[in-house]
Amino acid sequence: MTVALEMSDVSKEFDGNRALDSACFRAEYGRVQALLGENGAGKSSLMNVVCGLYAPDAGRIAVDGVPVSIDGPAHARALGIGMVHQHFKLVRPFTVAENVALANRLGGRWTDELARVAETVERYCGELGFELDPASRIDSISVAERQRVEIVKVLMSGARILILDEPTAVLTDDEADRLLAVVRGLAGRGAAVVLITHKLREVHDFADRVTIMRAGRTVADEDPKTLDDRRMTELMVGSAPRSAVAARSGGGRARLEIADLSAARDDGVAALAGVTLAVQEGEIYGVAGVGGNGQTELAEVLMGVRPALHGTVSLDGEDRTAAHPGERRKGGLGTVPSDRYLYGLTADLSVAENFGLAGLAAGRYGSWWVASARMRGDTEAAIADFEIQGGGPATRSRLLSGGNAQKLVLARELSGGAGILVAHSPTRGLDVRACAAVQSQLLEARDRGAAVLLISEDLDEVLDLSDRVGVLNRGRIVGEFARPADRHAVGRLMVGHA
Amino acid sequence: MIEFLANWLAFTPVFAVPLLLATLGLIVNERAGVINLGAEGMMLCGALAGVACYIEFGESTAVGMTAAAFAGLLIAFLFAFVVVVLRADQVVTGITIVFFGAGLTGLIGLRWNDTAIAGFQKLDLGFLSQIPFFGKVVFAQDAMVYLTVPIAFGVWYFLFRTRAGLNLRAVGENPQAADAAGIAVDFYRFWAVAAGGALCGLAGGYLALAAAKIWVNEMTHGRGWIAIALVIFARWMPGRAVFGAILFGGIEALIPRIFAAGWPVPQYFLQMTPFLATLGVLVWVGLAGKRRSAAPGALGLPYVREDRW
């Protein structure tokens, strides 16, 4: 078999975060090469380098044995590389044919060209066994159909190296099997297929080889038949030494209770399908799971910025399912959102103003006139307590580094004596020191008797901090573990096809 | 009454054409994802360039209009450089362009201030112009009115019947998708802004050479802003822009007719009516807009390829 694509020592940084750290990868014609890893392992980043969307900071790429420097999507396409992105690159108000035409020039008079594109789409669909109407608009067809448009689009452009980024994440089991059968067929006809996934079953059933990535590095390139599920999970989630964290003192009353909670994503697709869990005082309850299984929606429903379709959320026994964020706050809820600058901080207000927001709402700093001196004093105390560096109360929050901004959010959310804290990926993008500081604040809050719900895609973090771990998979808690949770059992439930 | 109606309708195209040209220009801009609030400034530059070149180069309306389009184009290059190449905030830059255009034309326009010109003349199409009522309304307009019809058609044809138009709309709806499909996002945005600027320049030139027949400071009187609202009214469709421009041109044409008829309506109220109508249109669009927004998906958003979140 000839090597289609070979990447060696590819590195890429985003704002100081290493997305790729000397990653290596190869794919051959006629083979399905799976690329396996947790969220944030660098799978998509690596493939975005291949298709010209990211310029690598270092590393070598060879296509068909020839070293290349891919300088944009157009160049990648000229090299025969086609990618079906996880977030489809489709123009919604356009028809299927128009979207395909955008990426494929057949030449000739434009109106004829569009008609010929539509014919070609139908021909490809016939060959692949897809059902697709070239005249329908993208926003009127299903997600599975949109994916077919992407595949046809890429194939029409003559791609011989086909990259599919988590293609089954948005599909039902049935649709997924049909799609993967088509993908196998494409490899059978000589294409090099790269299947990005985090589902072990797909690797076993459909891949000829598997590359496993963890934290931006390539940790394995093997025949999947030589790896059992346990070994694959191990390679994927690693086996970092567990730091000793004192267990909580003992069970108490439940402060945050979620019962049979359902919610939908913005596009109407179900994201939570009956989540039930309870967090007790003096406990950290960790929600583990691969990203995209409902974490964001769970955090948003709890914050009060996304409506629950079904089920209840109770704070200290009181039903607050329909309460707006302010009422929840009065009910003792503090939230640390994953996107600090979307829901967490107002970037251009000062540290003191951001810190005081919660207290102001609670009336702690006066009703009409802001008691700025008191607010300033409290802020200074918080800056000292939480070791917020890089500015004083008057500094604009935008100027704080990520870690210090996160400490500021935590300081505020815990300032009102919040008994219930929901933290979503609180250490995402932080360096090691800031990460440790934020984690120790969460533990301290727990020791003071707070009920902490930690939603994180970082399995190490969940396992280290949590007194109990629930695994979120496809919008459901599919298993619960008490400390110490078995890392591999948790990992299997995360990637399992439950 | 028929007399009044004929006079009113005969005057409508002169006011509708500049609104339509500017609206078409803005539709091209916004279809590519660039919101251009600088229309007023571009129109002013077009108006001054039109009048100045008309006076200085043999009193030719063709020369004047060409100069107007070029003036709009030059300002648009500046705007495009800042918002497309440097990716600055489009709203702030656009408003800056308005004041820049007003200041610049005030500064260099002194020489031609208040010089009355002959400008565009109504065409006499022989017997056609003699037809009662219709002759006056439809067949006795100036050349630019007739030329605007193919321009409007051309913009529609370009946007909806050519590959370049499809690419341009893709860039405005979803630049990520366009980029992944190998379309040069910045190229399309830059030239869409340039073309839109040229059309705004033409709109200003016509306003000076046909409607006002004179250059005065800040003579556009907010028509650039009306055009911005008309884009929303037209739901970004050139065909609907024609109706919107005729509607608002009609309102503007009514004002001098009412003065002429000697009806006791306060002058300032009359001058305010186009903006009242604009507000009305925006309220109407807001109330009716519950269905699906027709605005291009990436309107006003700079495109940076490696933006991850």
Image: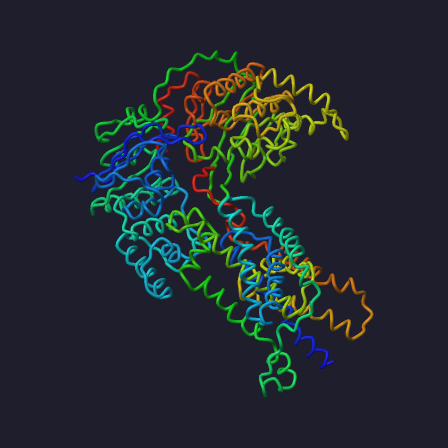
Locate the C terminus of chain A and report the quarter of the image it occupies: top left
User: Nearest the camera: A23 or A451?
Assistant: A23
Q: Image height check: is A182 above or below A196?
A: below
Image x and y of residue A195, in percent: 30, 39
| Rendered residue at 46%/35% (across/down) | A294
Residue A280 in the image: above or below residue A119? above
- Left or right position of A219 against B185: left
In the rendering, at what x and y percent does residue B138 appear? Answer: 60, 79
Residue B134: percent from left, percent from top: 62, 82
Residue A97 appears in which quarter of the rendering? Answer: bottom left
Is A114 located above or below residue B87 in the figure?
Answer: below
**Residue visible at 60% across and 28% down in the picture:** A397
Q: Which residue lies furthest to the left in this view?
A: A1
Left or right of B151? Residue B213 is: right
The one nearer the camera, A281 or B163, is B163
* Colour setup of the view: rainbow
Q: Decide if residue A1 is in sight here.
A: yes
Q: In this view, does A473 lie to the left or right of B76?
A: left
Q: Which residue is drawn at 57% across and 60% down?
A: B200
Where is residue B299? Give x, y as percent: 53, 50
Q: Who is closer to the viewer here, A19 or A318?
A: A19
Farthest right residue?
A: B264
Q: Can residue B292 be seen in this view?
A: no
Residue B16 is left or right of residue A130, and the answer is right
